[in-house]
Image (tube, rainbow, N blue to C red):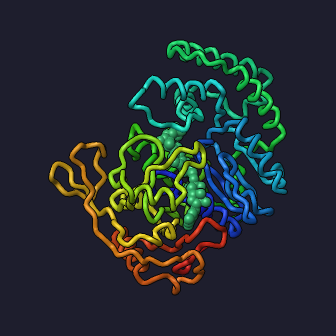
Amino acid sequence: MVDVILGMQWGDEGKGKIVDFFAKDYSLVARFQGGPNAGHTLYVNGQKIVLHQIPSGIFHPGIQNLIGNGVVLDPVTLKKECAAVAALGVDVKKNLFIAQRAHLILPTHRALDKAAELAKGEQKIGSTLKGIGPTYMDKTGRNGLRVGNLLDADFTAQYQKLRLKHQQLLDNHGFAEDIAAWETEFFEAIEFLRTLHVVNGEYFINEAIASGRKVLAEGAQGSMLDIDFGTFPFVTSSNTISAGVCSGLGIAPQTIREVYGVTKAYCTRVGGGPFPTELNDETGERLRQIGSEFGATTGRPRRCGWIDLVALKYACMLNGVTALVMTKADVLDTFATLQVGMAYEINGVKTDQMPFELIAPSLKPLYRSFSGWQQPITEFRQPAELPTLMQEYIQFIESYLGVPVRFVSNGPGRDQLIERSACAH
Ligand code: GDP
Ligand code: IMO
Ligand code: MG
């Protein structure tokens, strides 16, 4: 049996915290897509840690963590992250497993990411520059190197062959940065990777499922960054939705039980691309400051705005969401009025469906206003303590979406999560 936790918006919904909280009820946590573009923040014993590659179950001693085949893996980031996690007393080598079919991010993939963004100029995606796009391109283009290739005697020759191909592309871009230091780091990290448990991920996970162990699949990015259904081309290069769980881990659809969709009580986006409910004003700035909305991977300020129910309803449909987790509700504590995006008006026509593109110049969100609860909620632990005005805000959202908001997160801490209704896990 597999439950899934994934993002409903443009990433950074607080998935890491929620996975860390849920993990204790599972025996295996598995990342199924994305790579070090992810930044999942956890607080463990009051200490902040940001995970990019390692699944967010790593701080639970008895739980195994799998980096699935659908992930693109940067050995350099992984090595650094393993050291940071080990420094907190975790026996990371014991509980971390890596699928041999996961593709490797090479130094030249990072360089190509940078070169491609520079070439796009104003139209750049705002990528995290971690080499995600070029690595997935080499996967679908059938050129990439995989973790399992580390065992090949001619791994270095395979690397050089691909590197040469990349160099030609970099030359075409006029990219002249010296990446020799990146390569030294890469080969050191490759040696480290060879000391970790590399497994046949699909058998590893299916055997766990067959023996009755519970698996938690951890999404990265968010549904609106999905390569097929997000705001293309301003998206990432993987399927971030629940369908990606099957291909990213090698499991069958009927093994999936709950799909928990994580959404902020408002909305953010980092990088380029359309964002209909964005607030380019004082209110947006207040959300950014109160919510500490700065990227966990790149440190960039996140764009902020109101919750967008058109996008959320779309994400509920695509993912088959069975329950929602609303995070960062406490960030709204001081706002007198809250707006909820209910529909879009495009060329004077109202719609509650996601259009082909969100960039129509005439697109404007239609809102419904709610009175804010204007009281601090961070100390609350019981659903009955939540203010009535907040209950009204949440009840409206869940009735619009037709999906229950089962959990409300009221602070970054591990214990700041309120269960509103009974849960299957
Ligand atoms: P992820 O990528 O989805 O795991 O999310 P990030 O870690 O990138 O960003 C979420 C940020 O919000 C992190 O700094 C978390 O510590 C923080 N956070 C998570 N839940 C809450 C919450 O309920 N309230 C507040 N104030 N912060 C939260
Ligand atoms: P987590 O897992 C927020 C965004 C980038 C850029 C676009 C493409 O922490 O929620 P990429 O590097 O993937 O080619 O960038 O996607 N992006 C994220 N935004 N959270 C993330 O991950 C993201 N991963 C990528 O900012 O707009
Ligand atoms: Mg993040």
Q: Residue at x 55, y 71 (%)?
A: 410
On screen, residue 164 versus residue 58, left or right, reads left
The foreground one among 79 and 215 is: 79
Up/down of 208 relative to 355, above or below: below
Residue situated furthest bottom in the rendering: 384
Work out whether residue 330 can be spotted.
yes
The foreground one among 319 and 284 is: 284
Up/down of 120 relative to 280, above or below: above
Up/down of 196 relative to 182, above or below: below
Residue situated furthest left in the rendering: 348
For the image shown, how many numbered marks are present on the structure? 0
Work out whether residue 255 can be spotted.
no
Up/down of 154 relative to 92, above or below: above
The foreground one among 422 and 372 is: 372
On screen, residue 209 versus residue 324, left or right, reads right
Q: Can you say which quadrant of the picture contains the C terminus?
A: bottom right
Q: Residue 361: x percent and y percent? A: 23, 43
Q: Can you say which quadrant of the picture contains the N terminus?
A: bottom right
The quarter holding residue 353 reads bottom left
Instruction: Determine the quadrant in which ligand 1 lies.
Output: bottom right
Q: Residue at x 47, y 72 (%)?
A: 333
Q: Residue 84: x percent and y percent? A: 77, 48
Q: Residue at x 54, y 29 (%)?
A: 113
Q: Residue 377: x percent and y percent? A: 53, 77
Q: Residue 241: x percent and y percent? A: 48, 52
On screen, residue 87 versus residue 370, left or right, reads right
Q: Residue at x 75, y 60 (%)?
A: 59
